[in-house]
Image: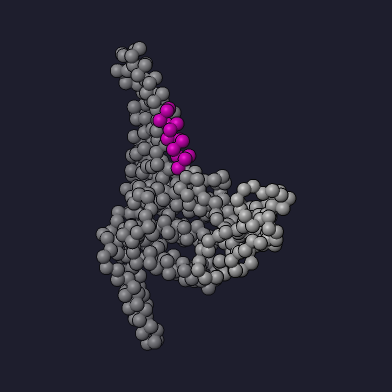
Amino acid sequence: MLERAAGPKLLGEENYRTSGDEFSSSAGPVSFPHLAVKMVQRVTYRRRLSYNTKSNKTRIIKTPGGKLALLHINKKASAPKCGDCGNVLSGVPTLRPTEYARLSRRQKSVTRPYGGSRCGTCVRSRIVRAFLIEEQKIVKRVLKSQQADAKKNPAATSTPTTKTLAQRLSILVLSAQFLWFVGHVTTVIQALCYVVLARFGYGGPKNYTKAFYGTLVSYGIIMYKAHGTPQFSGAYLQHLLQDENTWYLILAINWALSKPLLVTLLPYLVFSLFHSLNYFRSEVAPVVLPPTQFPAITPRIQRSIIWFVQSFQTRALRTVAFIEVFAIMPVLVIGIFLGWSSFMAPLLYSRFLVFRYHTSGLTKQAFAELKARMDAAAAHPRVPPAVKKMYAVVQEKVADMGQMPGQPAAAAGAQ
């Protein structure tokens, strides 16, 4: 008889044959193969924890191949990861197979914008790398052909050649400053279309939004040129908020997402008009109409633009400062009750006015004139004493809110 140590019953113990003296010795081959012991597979595993928890629950399952395996019931699913950087891919449901099978067809769909097995950052880097490689190949090919031509005809390379209109335009259009100019021109054209269509036709709100899209392009390029790639740091954010272009960009985003208000579009229209005129005078006109080929037309156009800018720019900027102080804030406050604007719009615009008060002399003049007019109105004999007292309290609160130490010097103007 086989004797075994006392202990708990093992899995598959009923399949062991323990009767018969023919198995008392383990030496030598078995004389009766039909009476051989039938061994079964055991599952030996190592507990992850010494105590039983909800996440440690397991059960034995049989795989499609007939193998016994230990399944952790509450094991978390592993998300698909990027093949380059190893980060988790967004847009893919991270579930166990049983949970994934319970989802509907809409929930199973992959919402990853790039698809495949790479994240968006790696896809963009691969695309940029591919374009740079192709650009290097083209540059090498062009340089090689130029060197070959120079060896064949050395005299031709020494003489200066006049660039064609297409070559001059390609150099101009491929610059970031030209895209800045296109943004300003878009703002001017769409703003004028909004003024006309909002009164006499349809499509006004679309033109209003497109005007601010042009503003976002131009101001975005200026911000990138001035501050570089965005960084998540307190020093970078503080430096960013000291630039008036940042505040105009934030307001442009807010106005583009709000209901159309003509008064909010006027400052951007004035800025874009003068910026586009100056760029056209200095960059576009000499390229389209070279002074050497059109000596009577190009200088005349440039002189006309200079006269217009010098005659009207100062007055236009002063008008913009008065519109920002006298018109926009009252319209936003009244718009809260009439549904034109949200509660956040006056708060955001008040911070903008505080910044402009400390950085712009024209805005200070507008506030001084506003204060003088309100003081004269409050000093009228017919004004009740309670109203005068309330006006004094409001004036004190506004003065306290306007104290912003450490502000930079006044900037030259919005870009």
Where residue 289 appears, as percent x and y from the top left, is 39, 31
Q: Quadrant of the N terminus?
A: bottom right
Where residue 393 appears, as percent x and y from the top left, is 35, 81
- The magenta segment is 125-138
State the image quarter where residue 304 is shown: top left
Q: How many marks?
A: 0
For the question of whether residue 39 can be seen, the reply is yes
Looking at the image, what colour scheme do you see?
A: one colour
Residue found 70% across the figure and 61% down from its top: 19
State the image quarter where residue 301 is shown: top left
Residue found 39% across the figure and 68% down from its top: 350
Q: Is residue 89 above or below residue 258?
A: above
**Farthest residue, direction right:** 34
Q: Was residue 131 drawn as part of the magenta stretch in this picture?
A: yes
**Farthest residue, direction bottom:** 385
Identify the main secondary structure in magenta: helix
